[in-house]
Amino acid sequence: MSRLTETPPLISFTILLNRLALGVFFLLAGVGKFQMGLQVFYEKKFLPMQPSWIPDWIGRPYGFALPFAEVLVGALLILGLFGRSAAMVVSLMLLSFSIALLNAGYFFNGPGPFHTNVLLFFLALWIAAAGSGAISLDALWFGRRRRR
């Protein structure tokens, strides 16, 4: 392997830490929705935030699938498996959350100038661009194919 294509250890460790932080955040968010109950989450948390211009035939399946998706992408990011794909899904989810927050009027009503989902969105985009890094199942399983 060429020295130009090797990832420096500090960058690999940084990718790992950021991947773990985002993965644990999404995993715990999904688990929290399961703990409150899917129906309760959908009725009390999701429906009030669903933009009125989203038809119910799109919003309802998305609302019920959301906890499953959060747990799945969170676990994939933690493991570093299909990291780019998982991070892109997280980016799209965060974009949809931000649109819902903006539509409901909560986007600028926090302690900062905008909602923290913006920071998480760009973190997810960075992970999608950088990949899972050298300390991941992606590197372990798929790295060997690239070297051959």
Image (cartoon, rainbow, N blue to C red):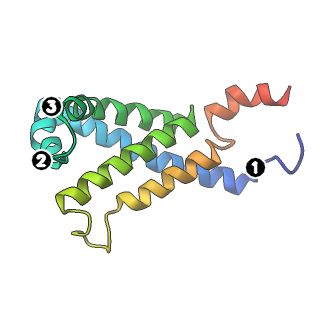
Asked if residue 31 can be seen in this view, the reply is yes
Q: Nearer the viewer, mark 2 or mark 1?
A: 2
Q: Which residue is mark 1?
A: 7
Q: Nearer the viewer, mark 3 or mark 2?
A: 2
Q: Is residue 123 left or right of residue 30?
A: right
Three-letter code, disc 3: Gly
Label 2 crowd bin: few (<14), some (14–19), many (20+), radius 10 Å: few
Q: Position of residue 119 (x, y in %)?
A: 43, 61
Q: Are marks 2 and 1 in contact (CB under 8 Å)?
A: no
Sequence-wise, the earlier of marks 2 and 1 is: 1
State the mark number for residue 48. Answer: 2
Label 3 crowd bin: few (<14), some (14–19), many (20+), radius 10 Å: few
C-alpha separation, residue under disc 3 versus residue under disc 2: 16 Å
Three-letter code, disc 1: Thr
Q: Position of residue 53 (x, y in %)?
A: 20, 45
State the quadrant of the N terminus.
top right
Q: Are marks 3 and 2 in contact (CB under 8 Å)?
A: no
Sequence-wise, the earlier of marks 3 and 2 is: 3
Three-letter code, disc 2: Pro
State the mark number for residue 37. Answer: 3
**Identity of the residue drawn at 69% across and 42% down:** 134
State the quadrant of the C terminus.
top right
The vertical placement of 54 against 104, above or below, is above
Work out whether residue 49 or residue 54 is closer to the camera in this orientation and state it: 54
The residue furthest right is 2
Q: Is residue 83 left or right of residue 3?
A: left
Secondary structure, mark 1, is: loop
